[in-house]
Amino acid sequence: MSLLGKAGRASAAQESGFAAHRAGVDRLLASYRAIPPDANVRLAKKTSNLFRARAQSNAPGLDVSGLTQVISVDPEARTAEVAGMTTYEDLVAVTLQYGLAPLVVPQLKTITLGGAVTGLGIESTSFRNGLPHESVLEIDVLTGAGEIITATRDGANAELLRGFPNSYGTLGYCTRLKIELEPVKPYVALRHIRFHDLRELENTMAQIIADRAYAGEQVDYLDGVVFSSHESYLVVARQTEEPGPVSDYTDMDIFYRSIQHDSAEPARDRLTISDYLWRWDTDWFWCSRAFGTQNPKIRRFWPKRYLRSSFYWKLIALDHKYDIGDRLEARKGNPPRERVVQDIEVPLEHTADFVEWFLREVPIEPIWLCPLRLRDTEGEQPWPLYPLEPGRTYVNIGFWSAVATTPGQQEGAANRAIERKVSELDGHKSLYSDSYYDRNEFAALYYGGDTYHQLKQHYDPDHRLLDLYSKAVQRK
């Protein structure tokens, strides 16, 4: 086909994408106008990657059903325009056709672009590419005032673009994003480096981030897993075009178990770029073990289409609705368990301090490690509602399970202890799950001084949307 023919097809596809997006925005605005003025505005969506209770409302929600598509991809400029409710699974399926990927692809397929920006996201490119919102060139936001506002990095409404990350829909909902993409190669070569000492792991992580290399090989991706204080791993990986056999962790084999080994030398593995990006989704990291799917006898008969995080999340939602887990514990004569599902960030030099404390005080394993550095080094706090220090390396530490409670213990005792320890180590905690801060402490950590209140007053003057403290902390 001629270049003209290809260009014509691309142009027609883009025009179709924009037309579908405009129709979706029209439905969204119509649904906004149908919500009574005295009712809180919320999304009408059946799925969520949040682990805290969502506010209940009798009012109809916003119709976002038309905001799930990839609008266009510009392979020359390495950008994509995407509707706010588009999942990373759908976006990556398109961009990989051009040999491109988002700068940061969060680990779970059904995380949406809008959700990752307003609620933060992270992955193994974050040590070099920062967080998803840092690759956003412009966004359209439906504000609490019912207007679609375009925000760009240095132009109109730049303060909204800066204040949007970690606002969790309390300033508005993203309807369109224009983001940067980066070239990727078809395969990823992995090395699993074992450590017997967490201090050594911390020091090696610092060296890799500084050099962007390990043992003479480039490092494009970096994360890690802690199984115990004496068994932890860094997974370093590089993109490659070298052909050869690849592993498959979407069937009987389980990725996180493949990391473990006893050798002093790193264990090696290879994946396609797509399987690497979604390596954690099949077993929701390691959380699928709660449903028995890591048992070979069960896994063999478990439908493959249900080996994915979105299905496990539905099972969790049923548990929350009917208290299935607590009922089972009660039948055994045990008290209810406290859910400890959190991601926190601490400065790199405090990684071992936190993990050692956590393994002593909150016996949950494995633990995920993911280093990050902000891309944007201009200004003291480029993203005021989640004020990580520019030029400083942090490590995201994720742990997702439950612990036994003690009768008479304060509600959320383990989570409260974690919050105190994170603050003590000059870190921050993501807000997708349970939080227990009082209002003053929360404001000091997440409001960026007066920034949040100023943005709230400007973009949601009638308070149609919940404020951040009410949404992230207060229980409904």
Image (spheres, rainbow, N blue to C red):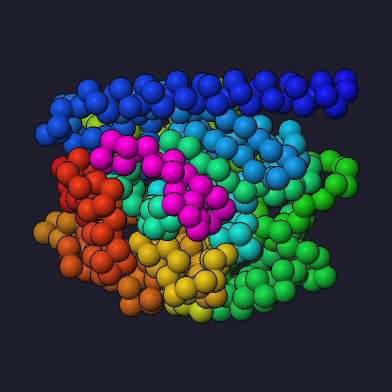
198 versus 338 height, above or below: below
| Furthest-front residue in this view | 156
392 versus 279 height, above or below: below
Q: Is residue 330 visible?
A: no
Q: Which of the image's four quarters has the N terminus? A: top right
User: Measuring 62% from the left and 48% from the top, which residue is drawn there?
Assistant: 180
Q: Is residue 15 visible?
A: yes
Asked if residue 115 is among those painted magenta in the image, a careful observer would answer: no
Give residue 237's position: percent from left, percent from top: 72, 57
User: Measuring 24% from the left and 26% from the top, which residue is drawn there?
Assistant: 33
275 versus 263 height, above or below: above
Front residue of 252/342: it is: 342
User: Measuring 20% from the left and 47% from the top, which residue is drawn there?
Assistant: 461
Give residue 361's position: percent from left, percent from top: 34, 68
Q: Which of the image's four quarters has the C terminus? A: top left
Give residue 37's position: percent from left, percent from top: 14, 32
Quadrant of residue 41 within the rendered picture: top left
Front residue of 250/6: it is: 6
Asked if residue 137 is among those painted magenta in the image, a careful observer would answer: yes
- Write down the region rendered in magenta: 133-156
